[in-house]
Image (cartoon, coloured by chain):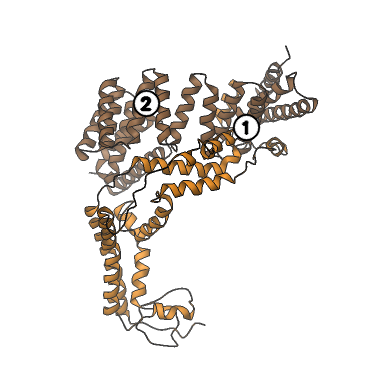
Chain colours: A orange, B brown
């Protein structure tokens, strides 16, 4: 239930809401340039690229093999899984386990990543929490349950206060994600200030990049491919096609009519 | 000095042209003359308003200029790019492409080799070397190099398509079909790959291949009702099977039915095309006669 509407001092708007937006934005832009300065080219291993593409092809074969004729599918499955000469059976890659603690390049990469992304967020968040604590900053336009209160109303100990009224720390986090499109406008695509994209990349990167042990990946792909059967999608394609007239809408413009007549 | 409304119109114009160039770039159009016209004007008159986009536009315009034999424009674009990105492999590749356009294949090859020495995973340089072989007419070597390339980079669809073209030119239809199967697998909803595959199967001939051809023509039509080539292909393959002496009565009946359906759809298409036109009657009759003459008769 919405409580009685609170009236906030307008100097909160002037001295809290706007400065937080400003700070978040400036810090984001700074992060972008610092990341560019510290960035160094990653050398890509040919073998890894090749292997990841092979795994992708095998996965596509599993998913879309039903569009191929039976024999073609069998031929490819045989190429991968044949007990003697199949790719997944024959190819063993030498794996050097890369310990993240001792491998220097990975260590520096991790440190750089942490430094430019996590550290500023923690610092600024903490400072804002300290500097702008004890009062309500803004109201989110949608109702929230009481469970959000301890999270969003840090420093405000009012039991009866609606959970929609949030503190400055939550306004800061709102800004971090909300200013993404502003960064795209100012810094162009692919900017390093875009934290949520970085987090997304970390998630998909784990799925797409070669796992440190290609042999394991090969084995699991072999198992997956072994159990796939070929159910041809084109079994009854003519009947499916001919149950209704073809839809020629959009086919005929002036030029195409004359082209058809010239056929 | 332009007035405010003129400035506004100029701004709108440059944005419009820039968006058009981006669309052509992202969708891989090859309308080089248009790109050269638009791009040249943008670069010469409105360079300041393009900001950082100008570099990718230089690249796009340079490649289009090479297509139109505009070496002057290509050279100036290349100079600008070289000045801005002095050690870039991407720019080196463009320099190599210019040498290719001037038919200086030895120099181009040397340039690409130097890129590959520096970065063995650079796919662009390898593909350019294969294009040089193709331009020189050395198709068997091009095929061999392309096969080696594809062994390492199995996912490169552009390369699979190029290989299928090369095989078709060499009349090695079985291998061309394999390449097209790769493309169909990775792009199951692309009706053009289905249609090309069906055409290769039809060319190979033989009852099994004709049946496959008919199925894939039908699939292409299912994916895109307006693919006229696939419709004609469906008609041809169905009639071919129906006319073959080795088929059972049921298969023959089915294929006659398919061919008849295809004929009716073709006539429908021509009638719709000629709607309201005087020549309609003649063209529809011409289509019917053509279909009759295409009937496969048993020899």
> Which residue is at 47% across, 79% downward?
A147
Please give the count of numbered marks on the rendered protein.
2
* Marker disc for residue B216: 1
The location of residue B228, given as percent across then percent down, is 61, 29
* Corner quadrant of residue B106: top left
* Marker disc for residue A14: none
Looking at the image, which is closer to me, B206 or B237?
Answer: B206
The location of residue A239, given as percent across then percent down, is 72, 37
Q: Earlier in the sequence, mark 1 or mark 2?
A: 2
Residue B191 relative to residue B63: left or right? right
Looking at the image, which is closer to me, B280 or B215?
Answer: B215
> Which residue is at 37% across, 39% downward?
B21
Same subunit, labels 1 and 2: the answer reads yes
Nearest to the eye among marks 1 and 2: give it: 2
Q: Is residue B231 visible?
A: no
Which secondary structure, mark 1? helix
Q: CA distance from mark 1 to mark 2?
A: 31 Å
Q: Chain of mark 2?
A: B
The location of residue B76, given as percent across then percent down, is 23, 31
């Amino acid at each position: 239930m919405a409580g009685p509407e609170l009236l906030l001092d307008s100097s909160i708007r002037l001295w809290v809401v706007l400065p937080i937006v400003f700070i978040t934005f400036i810090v984001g832009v700074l992060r972008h340039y610092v990341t560019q300065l510290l960035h160094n080219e990653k050398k890509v291993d040919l073998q890894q690229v090749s292997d990841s593409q092979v795994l992708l092809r095998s996965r596509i074969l599993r998913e879309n093999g039903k569009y191929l004729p039976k024999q073609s599918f069998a031929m490819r499955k045989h190429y991968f899984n044949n007990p003697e000469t199949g790719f997944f059976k024959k190819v063993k890659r030498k794996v050097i386990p890369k310990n993240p603690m001792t491998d220097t390049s990975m260590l520096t990469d991790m440190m750089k990543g942490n430094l430019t992304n996590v550290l500023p967020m923690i610092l600024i968040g903490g400072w804002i929490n300290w500097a702008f604590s004890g009062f309500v900053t803004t109201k989110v336009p949608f109702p929230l349950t009481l469970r959000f209160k301890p999270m969003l109303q840090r420093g405000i100990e009012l039991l009866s206060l609606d959970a929609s009224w949030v503190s400055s720390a939550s306004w800061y986090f709102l800004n971090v994600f909300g200013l993404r499109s502003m960064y795209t406008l100012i810094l162009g695509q692919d900017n390093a200030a875009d934290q949520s994209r970085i987090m997304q990349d970390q998630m998909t990167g784990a799925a797409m990049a070669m796992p440190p042990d290609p042999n394991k990946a090969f084995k699991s792909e072999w198992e997956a491919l072994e159990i796939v059967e070929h159910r041809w999608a084109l079994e009854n394609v003519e009947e499916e096609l001919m149950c209704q007239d073809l839809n020629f809408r959009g086919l005929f413009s002036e030029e195409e009519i004359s082209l058809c007549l010239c056929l | 000095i332009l007035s405010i409304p003129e400035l506004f119109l100029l701004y709108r114009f440059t944005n419009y042209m820039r968006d058009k160039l981006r669309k052509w770039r992202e969708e891989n159009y090859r309308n080089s003359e248009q790109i050269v016209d638009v791009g040249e004007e943008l670069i010469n008159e409105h360079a300041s308003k393009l900001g950082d986009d100008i570099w990718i536009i230089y690249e796009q315009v340079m490649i289009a200029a090479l297509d139109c034999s505009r070496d002057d424009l290509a050279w100036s674009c290349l100079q600008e790019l070289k000045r801005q990105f002095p050690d870039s492999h991407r720019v080196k590749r463009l320099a190599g492409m210019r040498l290719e356009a001037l038919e200086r294949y030895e120099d181009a090859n040397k340039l690409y080799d130097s890129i590959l020495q520096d970065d063995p995973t650079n796919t662009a340089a390898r593909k350019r070397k294969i294009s040089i072989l193709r331009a020189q007419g050395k198709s068997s070597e091009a095929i061999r190099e392309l096969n080696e390339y594809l062994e390492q980079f199995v996912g490169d669809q552009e390369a699979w398509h190029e290989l299928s073209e090369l095989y078709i030119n060499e009349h090695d239809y079985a291998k061309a079909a394999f390449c097209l199967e790769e493309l169909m697998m990775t792009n199951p909803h692309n009706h053009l790959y289905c249609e090309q595959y069906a055409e290769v199967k039809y060319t190979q001939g033989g009852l099994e291949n004709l049946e496959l051809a008919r199925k894939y023509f039908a699939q292409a039509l299912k994916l895109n009702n307006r693919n006229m080539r696939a419709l004609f292909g469906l008609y041809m393959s169905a009639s071919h099977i129906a006319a073959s002496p080795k088929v059972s009565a049921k298969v023959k009946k089915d294929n006659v039915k398919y061919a008849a359906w295809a004929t009716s759809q073709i006539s429908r298409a021509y009638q719709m095309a000629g709607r309201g036109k005087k020549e309609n009657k003649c063209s529809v009759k011409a289509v019917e006669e053509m279909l009759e003459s295409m009937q496969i008769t048993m020899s």
